[in-house]
Image (cartoon, rainbow, N blue to C red):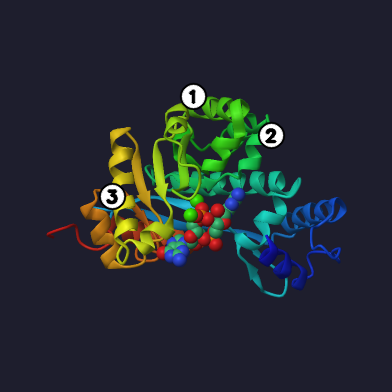
Amino acid sequence: MVAGIKALTEAGLLGPLPADGIPPADVVAAFADRLREAIQRDELRLTYQPQADAHTGRLTGFEALVRWRLPDGTVLPPDVFVPMAEAGEGIHILGEWVLRRACETAAAWLRHGVTDVPVAVNLSSLQLENEGLARTVLGVLTETGLPAANLKLELTETALFQGGDQARQILLELRGAGVRLVLDDFGTGHSSLALLRKVPVEALKIDKHFVQAMVEDRDAAAIVHAVVALAHALGLQVIAEGVETAEQLLFLRAYRCDRIQGFHFSRPLAAEDVPGFIARNAQFGNAGPPPGG
Ligand code: C2E
Ligand code: CA
Ligand code: CA
Protein backbone atom coordinates (compact mmCIF):
# COMPACT_ATOMS: atom_id res chain seq x y z
CA MET A 1 0.00 0.00 0.00
CA VAL A 2 2.81 2.46 0.92
CA ALA A 3 4.57 2.26 -2.47
CA GLY A 4 1.16 2.66 -4.11
CA ILE A 5 0.37 5.76 -2.05
CA LYS A 6 3.67 7.33 -3.07
CA ALA A 7 3.04 6.64 -6.76
CA LEU A 8 -0.55 7.92 -6.53
CA THR A 9 0.55 11.09 -4.73
CA GLU A 10 3.22 11.73 -7.36
CA ALA A 11 0.62 11.24 -10.08
CA GLY A 12 -1.55 13.89 -8.38
CA LEU A 13 -4.31 11.39 -7.60
CA LEU A 14 -4.19 11.77 -3.80
CA GLY A 15 -4.43 14.95 -1.78
CA PRO A 16 -2.01 15.79 1.04
CA LEU A 17 -1.78 13.08 3.67
CA PRO A 18 -1.35 13.39 7.45
CA ALA A 19 2.07 12.70 8.98
CA ASP A 20 1.30 9.03 9.63
CA GLY A 21 0.73 8.55 5.88
CA ILE A 22 -2.58 6.74 6.42
CA PRO A 23 -5.25 8.15 4.10
CA PRO A 24 -8.21 9.51 6.12
CA ALA A 25 -11.82 8.79 5.11
CA ASP A 26 -12.25 11.96 3.01
CA VAL A 27 -9.13 11.16 0.97
CA VAL A 28 -10.36 7.59 0.41
CA ALA A 29 -13.78 8.90 -0.71
CA ALA A 30 -12.15 11.46 -3.03
CA PHE A 31 -10.11 8.64 -4.58
CA ALA A 32 -13.27 6.66 -5.29
CA ASP A 33 -14.64 9.77 -7.06
CA ARG A 34 -11.40 10.01 -9.03
CA LEU A 35 -11.89 6.39 -10.15
CA ARG A 36 -15.44 7.21 -11.28
CA GLU A 37 -14.04 10.09 -13.33
CA ALA A 38 -11.34 7.83 -14.76
CA ILE A 39 -14.07 5.50 -15.99
CA GLN A 40 -16.06 8.36 -17.51
CA ARG A 41 -12.91 9.66 -19.23
CA ASP A 42 -12.05 6.18 -20.51
CA GLU A 43 -8.71 6.07 -18.68
CA LEU A 44 -9.01 2.46 -17.50
CA ARG A 45 -7.94 -0.40 -19.76
CA LEU A 46 -7.97 -4.16 -19.52
CA THR A 47 -5.10 -6.20 -20.86
CA TYR A 48 -5.61 -9.90 -21.50
CA GLN A 49 -2.93 -12.45 -20.70
CA PRO A 50 -3.24 -15.77 -22.55
CA GLN A 51 -3.22 -19.11 -20.71
CA ALA A 52 -2.23 -22.37 -22.39
CA ASP A 53 -2.43 -26.12 -21.95
CA ALA A 54 1.00 -26.99 -20.45
CA HIS A 55 1.32 -30.13 -22.59
CA THR A 56 -0.08 -29.17 -25.99
CA GLY A 57 0.38 -25.38 -26.00
CA ARG A 58 -3.27 -24.92 -26.95
CA LEU A 59 -4.80 -21.59 -25.85
CA THR A 60 -7.22 -22.18 -22.96
CA GLY A 61 -8.32 -18.68 -21.96
CA PHE A 62 -7.27 -15.19 -20.89
CA GLU A 63 -6.91 -13.36 -17.58
CA ALA A 64 -8.10 -9.74 -17.57
CA LEU A 65 -5.63 -7.40 -15.84
CA VAL A 66 -6.53 -3.76 -15.26
CA ARG A 67 -4.33 -0.71 -16.05
CA TRP A 68 -4.90 3.03 -15.53
CA ARG A 69 -3.66 5.26 -18.32
CA LEU A 70 -3.36 8.88 -17.14
CA PRO A 71 -3.92 11.79 -19.54
CA ASP A 72 -0.12 12.40 -19.66
CA GLY A 73 0.38 8.85 -20.94
CA THR A 74 1.67 7.33 -17.67
CA VAL A 75 0.30 3.81 -17.20
CA LEU A 76 -0.29 2.79 -13.58
CA PRO A 77 -0.20 -0.94 -12.79
CA PRO A 78 -2.92 -2.41 -10.57
CA ASP A 79 -0.59 -2.94 -7.62
CA VAL A 80 -0.43 0.86 -7.35
CA PHE A 81 -4.15 1.69 -7.32
CA VAL A 82 -6.10 -1.45 -6.38
CA PRO A 83 -5.00 -1.32 -2.69
CA MET A 84 -6.13 2.33 -2.43
CA ALA A 85 -9.43 1.46 -4.12
CA GLU A 86 -9.78 -1.35 -1.56
CA ALA A 87 -9.63 1.20 1.26
CA GLY A 88 -13.20 2.23 0.43
CA GLU A 89 -16.04 2.32 -2.10
CA GLY A 90 -13.55 2.47 -4.98
CA ILE A 91 -13.10 -1.30 -5.16
CA HIS A 92 -16.79 -1.83 -5.93
CA ILE A 93 -16.73 0.82 -8.67
CA LEU A 94 -13.52 -0.59 -10.15
CA GLY A 95 -14.61 -4.21 -9.73
CA GLU A 96 -17.90 -3.69 -11.52
CA TRP A 97 -16.25 -1.83 -14.38
CA VAL A 98 -13.64 -4.58 -14.84
CA LEU A 99 -16.30 -7.28 -14.78
CA ARG A 100 -18.52 -5.54 -17.34
CA ARG A 101 -15.68 -4.69 -19.71
CA ALA A 102 -14.18 -8.21 -19.53
CA CYS A 103 -17.58 -9.80 -20.19
CA GLU A 104 -18.34 -7.45 -23.10
CA THR A 105 -14.97 -8.25 -24.65
CA ALA A 106 -15.29 -12.01 -24.17
CA ALA A 107 -18.82 -11.88 -25.60
CA ALA A 108 -17.35 -10.22 -28.71
CA TRP A 109 -14.79 -13.06 -29.08
CA LEU A 110 -17.69 -15.48 -28.89
CA ARG A 111 -19.59 -13.60 -31.60
CA HIS A 112 -16.48 -14.02 -33.77
CA GLY A 113 -16.78 -17.77 -33.39
CA VAL A 114 -14.26 -18.40 -30.60
CA THR A 115 -16.27 -20.64 -28.33
CA ASP A 116 -13.92 -22.23 -25.80
CA VAL A 117 -11.88 -19.25 -24.61
CA PRO A 118 -13.16 -18.06 -21.22
CA VAL A 119 -12.07 -14.84 -19.55
CA ALA A 120 -10.83 -14.80 -15.94
CA VAL A 121 -11.53 -11.75 -13.77
CA ASN A 122 -9.79 -11.00 -10.46
CA LEU A 123 -12.17 -10.47 -7.57
CA SER A 124 -11.03 -8.55 -4.50
CA SER A 125 -11.95 -10.21 -1.21
CA LEU A 126 -13.79 -6.96 -0.37
CA GLN A 127 -16.15 -7.42 -3.31
CA LEU A 128 -17.49 -10.50 -1.52
CA GLU A 129 -18.59 -8.23 1.33
CA ASN A 130 -21.19 -6.81 -1.03
CA GLU A 131 -24.21 -9.05 -0.55
CA GLY A 132 -25.55 -8.03 -3.98
CA LEU A 133 -22.44 -9.34 -5.76
CA ALA A 134 -24.01 -12.51 -7.20
CA ARG A 135 -26.91 -10.45 -8.59
CA THR A 136 -24.47 -7.94 -10.11
CA VAL A 137 -22.38 -10.65 -11.77
CA LEU A 138 -25.40 -12.50 -13.16
CA GLY A 139 -26.88 -9.19 -14.35
CA VAL A 140 -23.68 -8.35 -16.23
CA LEU A 141 -23.71 -11.80 -17.89
CA THR A 142 -27.29 -11.25 -19.03
CA GLU A 143 -26.61 -7.72 -20.30
CA THR A 144 -23.48 -8.69 -22.21
CA GLY A 145 -24.79 -12.03 -23.47
CA LEU A 146 -21.78 -13.94 -22.13
CA PRO A 147 -22.59 -17.53 -21.06
CA ALA A 148 -21.72 -18.12 -17.38
CA ALA A 149 -19.28 -20.90 -18.33
CA ASN A 150 -17.16 -18.36 -20.24
CA LEU A 151 -16.50 -16.39 -17.04
CA LYS A 152 -14.01 -17.42 -14.38
CA LEU A 153 -13.60 -15.51 -11.15
CA GLU A 154 -10.17 -15.59 -9.51
CA LEU A 155 -10.46 -15.45 -5.73
CA THR A 156 -7.73 -15.30 -3.13
CA GLU A 157 -7.41 -17.48 -0.09
CA THR A 158 -8.09 -14.38 2.01
CA ALA A 159 -11.47 -13.98 0.34
CA LEU A 160 -12.43 -17.52 1.25
CA PHE A 161 -10.84 -17.49 4.67
CA GLN A 162 -12.13 -14.16 5.93
CA GLY A 163 -15.32 -13.94 3.93
CA GLY A 164 -17.30 -16.26 6.17
CA ASP A 165 -20.72 -17.66 5.35
CA GLN A 166 -21.91 -14.72 3.25
CA ALA A 167 -18.93 -15.07 0.90
CA ARG A 168 -19.50 -18.82 0.60
CA GLN A 169 -23.21 -18.28 -0.12
CA ILE A 170 -22.38 -15.82 -2.90
CA LEU A 171 -19.86 -18.25 -4.40
CA LEU A 172 -22.29 -21.16 -4.22
CA GLU A 173 -24.93 -19.06 -5.97
CA LEU A 174 -22.50 -18.06 -8.72
CA ARG A 175 -21.23 -21.61 -9.15
CA GLY A 176 -24.83 -22.84 -9.24
CA ALA A 177 -25.44 -20.44 -12.13
CA GLY A 178 -22.47 -21.91 -14.01
CA VAL A 179 -19.77 -19.30 -13.27
CA ARG A 180 -16.36 -20.95 -12.77
CA LEU A 181 -14.19 -20.27 -9.74
CA VAL A 182 -10.40 -20.39 -9.44
CA LEU A 183 -8.30 -20.01 -6.30
CA ASP A 184 -5.53 -17.47 -7.06
CA ASP A 185 -2.05 -17.06 -5.54
CA PHE A 186 -2.21 -20.51 -3.97
CA GLY A 187 0.49 -21.02 -1.37
CA THR A 188 0.83 -17.41 -0.25
CA GLY A 189 -2.11 -17.34 2.18
CA HIS A 190 -3.68 -19.78 4.57
CA SER A 191 -3.86 -22.70 2.13
CA SER A 192 -6.45 -24.35 4.34
CA LEU A 193 -7.25 -27.76 2.96
CA ALA A 194 -10.51 -27.89 4.90
CA LEU A 195 -11.60 -24.68 3.18
CA LEU A 196 -10.77 -26.07 -0.25
CA ARG A 197 -13.45 -28.69 0.22
CA LYS A 198 -16.08 -26.13 1.21
CA VAL A 199 -15.86 -23.86 -1.81
CA PRO A 200 -16.70 -24.95 -5.32
CA VAL A 201 -13.43 -23.98 -7.05
CA GLU A 202 -12.39 -25.92 -10.15
CA ALA A 203 -8.72 -24.95 -10.21
CA LEU A 204 -5.79 -23.69 -8.14
CA LYS A 205 -3.36 -21.13 -9.43
CA ILE A 206 0.16 -21.63 -8.09
CA ASP A 207 1.68 -18.28 -7.24
CA LYS A 208 4.48 -17.04 -9.45
CA HIS A 209 6.95 -16.86 -6.57
CA PHE A 210 6.97 -20.67 -6.31
CA VAL A 211 7.19 -21.09 -10.07
CA GLN A 212 10.15 -18.76 -10.29
CA ALA A 213 11.99 -20.26 -7.32
CA MET A 214 11.32 -23.84 -8.43
CA VAL A 215 14.26 -24.40 -10.79
CA GLU A 216 16.89 -23.29 -8.25
CA ASP A 217 15.24 -24.22 -4.98
CA ARG A 218 14.42 -27.85 -4.21
CA ASP A 219 11.90 -26.92 -1.51
CA ALA A 220 9.95 -24.70 -3.91
CA ALA A 221 10.04 -27.50 -6.48
CA ALA A 222 8.77 -30.00 -3.90
CA ILE A 223 5.93 -27.61 -3.00
CA VAL A 224 4.88 -27.16 -6.62
CA HIS A 225 5.01 -30.92 -7.23
CA ALA A 226 3.00 -31.63 -4.07
CA VAL A 227 0.40 -28.92 -4.80
CA VAL A 228 -0.24 -30.41 -8.24
CA ALA A 229 -0.66 -33.89 -6.74
CA LEU A 230 -2.91 -32.56 -3.98
CA ALA A 231 -5.07 -30.59 -6.40
CA HIS A 232 -5.45 -33.57 -8.71
CA ALA A 233 -6.35 -35.81 -5.78
CA LEU A 234 -9.13 -33.34 -4.96
CA GLY A 235 -10.30 -33.28 -8.58
CA LEU A 236 -8.99 -29.76 -9.21
CA GLN A 237 -6.95 -28.45 -12.13
CA VAL A 238 -3.70 -26.55 -11.66
CA ILE A 239 -2.53 -23.40 -13.42
CA ALA A 240 1.03 -22.12 -12.91
CA GLU A 241 1.40 -18.35 -13.25
CA GLY A 242 4.55 -16.34 -13.94
CA VAL A 243 6.11 -18.98 -16.22
CA GLU A 244 9.00 -17.15 -17.87
CA THR A 245 11.38 -19.83 -19.14
CA ALA A 246 11.40 -23.08 -21.12
CA GLU A 247 13.08 -24.74 -18.14
CA GLN A 248 10.22 -23.80 -15.81
CA LEU A 249 7.80 -25.20 -18.38
CA LEU A 250 9.73 -28.51 -18.46
CA PHE A 251 9.50 -28.81 -14.67
CA LEU A 252 5.78 -28.05 -14.75
CA ARG A 253 5.17 -30.64 -17.45
CA ALA A 254 7.11 -33.23 -15.44
CA TYR A 255 4.91 -32.41 -12.43
CA ARG A 256 1.77 -32.80 -14.59
CA CYS A 257 0.67 -29.20 -14.12
CA ASP A 258 -2.34 -28.63 -16.39
CA ARG A 259 -2.03 -25.07 -17.59
CA ILE A 260 0.47 -22.23 -17.72
CA GLN A 261 0.38 -18.46 -17.87
CA GLY A 262 3.40 -16.18 -18.11
CA PHE A 263 5.77 -14.26 -20.33
CA HIS A 264 7.09 -17.52 -21.84
CA PHE A 265 3.72 -18.01 -23.55
CA SER A 266 2.71 -14.36 -23.83
CA ARG A 267 2.73 -11.03 -22.04
CA PRO A 268 -0.67 -9.46 -21.34
CA LEU A 269 -2.12 -8.16 -24.64
CA ALA A 270 -4.12 -5.06 -25.48
CA ALA A 271 -7.74 -5.96 -26.26
CA GLU A 272 -7.28 -5.13 -29.94
CA ASP A 273 -4.40 -7.63 -30.24
CA VAL A 274 -6.40 -10.55 -28.84
CA PRO A 275 -8.29 -11.59 -32.03
CA GLY A 276 -5.00 -11.83 -33.98
CA PHE A 277 -3.42 -13.86 -31.18
CA ILE A 278 -6.37 -16.24 -31.13
CA ALA A 279 -6.19 -16.68 -34.90
CA ARG A 280 -2.41 -17.39 -34.86
CA ASN A 281 -2.69 -19.71 -31.90
CA ALA A 282 -5.46 -21.74 -33.48
CA GLN A 283 -2.95 -22.62 -36.21
CA PHE A 284 0.26 -23.32 -34.30
CA GLY A 285 -0.03 -23.28 -30.53
CA ASN A 286 2.58 -21.06 -28.97
CA ALA A 287 3.94 -22.65 -25.80
CA GLY A 288 6.56 -24.75 -27.59
CA PRO A 289 6.29 -28.31 -28.82
CA PRO A 290 4.65 -30.98 -26.68
CA PRO A 291 7.09 -33.20 -24.73
CA GLY A 292 8.99 -35.48 -27.07
CA GLY A 293 7.51 -33.64 -30.07
P1 C2E B 1 -2.22 -11.68 -10.19
O1 C2E B 1 -3.69 -11.96 -10.23
O2 C2E B 1 -1.35 -12.69 -9.52
O3 C2E B 1 -1.81 -11.46 -11.71
C1 C2E B 1 -0.62 -11.90 -12.28
C2 C2E B 1 0.39 -10.77 -12.37
O4 C2E B 1 1.63 -11.32 -12.80
C3 C2E B 1 0.03 -9.71 -13.39
O5 C2E B 1 0.58 -8.48 -12.94
C4 C2E B 1 0.80 -10.17 -14.63
O6 C2E B 1 1.06 -9.17 -15.56
C5 C2E B 1 2.07 -10.67 -13.98
N1 C2E B 1 2.75 -11.66 -14.80
C6 C2E B 1 2.22 -12.46 -15.74
N2 C2E B 1 3.13 -13.26 -16.28
C7 C2E B 1 4.29 -12.98 -15.65
C8 C2E B 1 5.63 -13.51 -15.77
O7 C2E B 1 5.93 -14.42 -16.55
N3 C2E B 1 6.56 -12.98 -14.94
C9 C2E B 1 6.26 -12.00 -14.04
N4 C2E B 1 7.27 -11.53 -13.28
N5 C2E B 1 5.03 -11.48 -13.91
C10 C2E B 1 4.06 -11.98 -14.71
P2 C2E B 1 -0.32 -7.17 -12.93
O8 C2E B 1 -1.14 -7.09 -14.17
O9 C2E B 1 0.58 -6.04 -12.59
O10 C2E B 1 -1.32 -7.45 -11.75
C11 C2E B 1 -0.86 -7.49 -10.42
C12 C2E B 1 -1.98 -7.88 -9.48
O11 C2E B 1 -3.01 -6.87 -9.46
C13 C2E B 1 -2.71 -9.15 -9.89
O12 C2E B 1 -1.95 -10.26 -9.51
C14 C2E B 1 -4.02 -9.00 -9.16
O13 C2E B 1 -3.88 -9.42 -7.82
C15 C2E B 1 -4.24 -7.49 -9.18
N6 C2E B 1 -5.20 -7.15 -10.24
C16 C2E B 1 -5.01 -7.01 -11.55
N7 C2E B 1 -6.16 -6.70 -12.19
C17 C2E B 1 -7.12 -6.65 -11.24
C18 C2E B 1 -8.54 -6.38 -11.25
O14 C2E B 1 -9.15 -6.16 -12.29
N8 C2E B 1 -9.18 -6.42 -10.05
C19 C2E B 1 -8.54 -6.71 -8.88
N9 C2E B 1 -9.23 -6.74 -7.75
N10 C2E B 1 -7.21 -6.96 -8.84
C20 C2E B 1 -6.52 -6.93 -9.99
CA1 CA C 1 -5.13 -13.43 -10.85
CA1 CA D 1 -0.15 -14.12 -8.14
Answer yes or no: do the residues labelled 3 and 1 have beta carbons within 8 Å? no
Q: How many labels, in total?
A: 3
Decide if residue 275 is in sight here: no
For the point 72% across and 69% down, which residue is it?
6
- Gap in Å between the C-alphas at discs 2 and 1? 18 Å
Q: Amino acid at mark 2?
A: Asn
Q: Give the percent coordinates (x, y) of residue 3.
A: 67, 67
Q: Tell which tag, 3 or 1, sits nearer the viewer.
A: 3
Label 3 sits on residue = 225
Q: Residue 176: which numbered mark, if any?
A: 1
Q: Residue 59: which numbered mark, if any?
A: none
Q: Amino acid at mark 3?
A: His
Which quarter of the picture shows residue 275? bottom left
Left or right: where 62 falls relative to 99: left
The answer to whether residue 145 is above or below residue 11 is above
- Gap in Å between the C-alphas at discs 3 and 1? 31 Å
Front residue of 281/6: it is 6
Q: Give the percent coordinates (x, y) of residue 117.
A: 40, 46
Which residue sits furthest left?
292
The N terminus - image quarter? bottom right
- Gap in Å between the C-alphas at discs 2 and 3? 36 Å
